[in-house]
Amino acid sequence: MRDYISKRGREIPPSGIRKFFDLALTMEEVISLGVGEPDFSTPWNICEASIYSIEQGGTSYTSNRGLQTLREALSRYLRDHYHLTYHPDEEMIITTGVSEGLDIAIRAVVDPGDEVLVAEPCYVSYSPCVTLAGGVPVPVPCLRKDRFRLNPDILMERITGKSKALIINFPNNPTGAVMRKEDLQAVADIVCDHDLVLISDEVYAELTYDGSHVASATVGDLAARTITLNGFSKAYAMTGWRIGYLCAPREICDAALKIHQYVMLCAPVMGQVAALEGIRRGEDEKNRMVSEYRVRRNLFIESLNRIGLPCHLPEGAFYAFPSVEKTGLSDYEFAEQLLKEEHVAVVPGSVFGQGGAGHLRCAYAVSRKDLNEAVRRMEAFIQRLK
Amino acid sequence: MDEKDLLLLQLLEENSRLTTREMAVMAEIAPDEIEARIAALESAGVIRSYSAVIDWERAGNGEVSAIIELKVNPERDYGYDRIAERIARFRQVRSLRLITGTYDLQLTVTGKNMQEVARFVSEYIAPMDRIRETATHIIMKSYKEHGRTFCEKEGSERIPYSL
């Protein structure tokens, strides 16, 4: 029999934490700081809106772009909160999570052989999606000395004649780094000079703690060449509903829409109805959750530094990214031994690409009680290493 | 009262056993200032007391609670205030509110058993001057008190890792 598996299907790397996942499932009383989602359930008014809609028979396809009412509400929201101007009928697509948005964004602009710069550490799907589109991912490391912001000099070094696009994610998973306006301006100059497309995943925008989020497309001349990706998963505690959105200039949006209609048709209507309730009446609950994350961040970062895991104060998202260098263990060794000995699950930073080695991603989207217990166990673990 | 005060109140309402140091870290305020702010909130009567939310049914002391609604003839110059103050003095009365709608006052009462609650209402509350009518509702089960649900399931299991 032939080997039926495609070259891409064979060569795409498996998840870097499969081993940890399987190990954790065999254990009792695991406290997981390994989850990239809120610990809150979706606010109940959002669930009720969706339940009611299902009861009324709202179970069909929507237009490819997504519900008109949702796009209009989002367009106003983005204008009022982030000074973004996107036309709801021409420059916006509701996607099945940001994951789909990212995939169709890449496929809309990348030809085989094109190089796509990927600011790392980052969410694990960026490079594989570039590969699946026939492109060549080129990592651009963001370093601890730069507070994990994208350094324009390092970006310049990686640009070649084949560079087509740059993917960034701020506030960042896994580092919690945030790009200020002046940081983005420097990147904008390079992106424009080299005629690149910017793909900006801003799914953690609402979780910006110090100051307010600066949307990439509002900086310099980026609007004409930026694909903005965002979604409801993180800010509204709606991970399982799978609702994201892609905003881009019309030509790019049209291309992405063709791909979207063939591979997805539309995002699930139940999720879209829920998202509409979130955008219309979810503000208070969202703010309450963001305020709680900020409190947990302060507690957790202070604790990590106290027990000997140096960590900068993350300005966004809900991840701490402490260094384990002083312990003498690699991030993989630390994460594995910590799981085995103390039943605390964290993710080794290497999983997220260049610049991540020697760090751990610890999600603090867990209750304060669990967070305190996790710190207690981590401290015990570190004490034994000495 | 500013945003920091509001944050402190929220933190304390949720858990009044937090230490000053913990609150200082959480709220990004110096410990001395935390103490000063809380003292000010206490003396202004914004913070009334510190207590625990207890599921007495689970504690198993067998006490019974009831919601009592009263129709009251208000008093010239005083309205409902003087009679409300009298009712509030009973130890058995756990809360007392002036409300809109069919009834005027609503109180919650606890007692050792149903008879004790009924006796308290019929012997002390109902005979008071100006009380025209009472309605007693025995509480059969509490689902939520002070913003805390008692029935909440642990939530669906989250997977241990997601990136």
Image (cartoon, coloured by chain):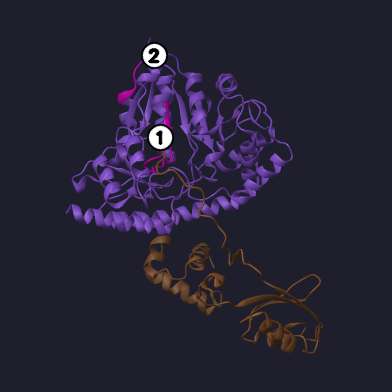
Q: Which residue is mark 2?
A: A113
User: Where the C terminus of chain A falls, by quadrant?
Assistant: bottom left
- Quadrant containing the N terminus of chain A is top left
Give how far across and how far down residue A278 sits, in percent.
62, 45
Q: Please provide percent x and percent y for residue A291.
A: 49, 55
Q: Nearer the viewer, residue B85 or A155?
A: B85
**Residue A259, how many percent across, how many down?**
55, 20
Identified by mark 2, the residue type is: Gly
Name the residue beneath numbered marker 1. A123
Q: What colour denotes chain B? A: brown
Residue at screen point 52% across, 41% down: A239
Range of the magenta residues?
A: A157-179
In-front residue for pair B120/B11: B120
Using the image, tell me which numbered label, if any, was put on residue B20.
none
Based on the displayed image, in which of its 4 quarters is residue A188 positioned?
Answer: top left
The residue mark sitting in front, 1 or 2, is 1
Which mark sits nearer the N-terminus, 1 or 2?
2
Q: Could you tell me the amino acid type at mark 1?
A: Tyr
Asked if the magenta segment contains residue A161, the reply would be: yes
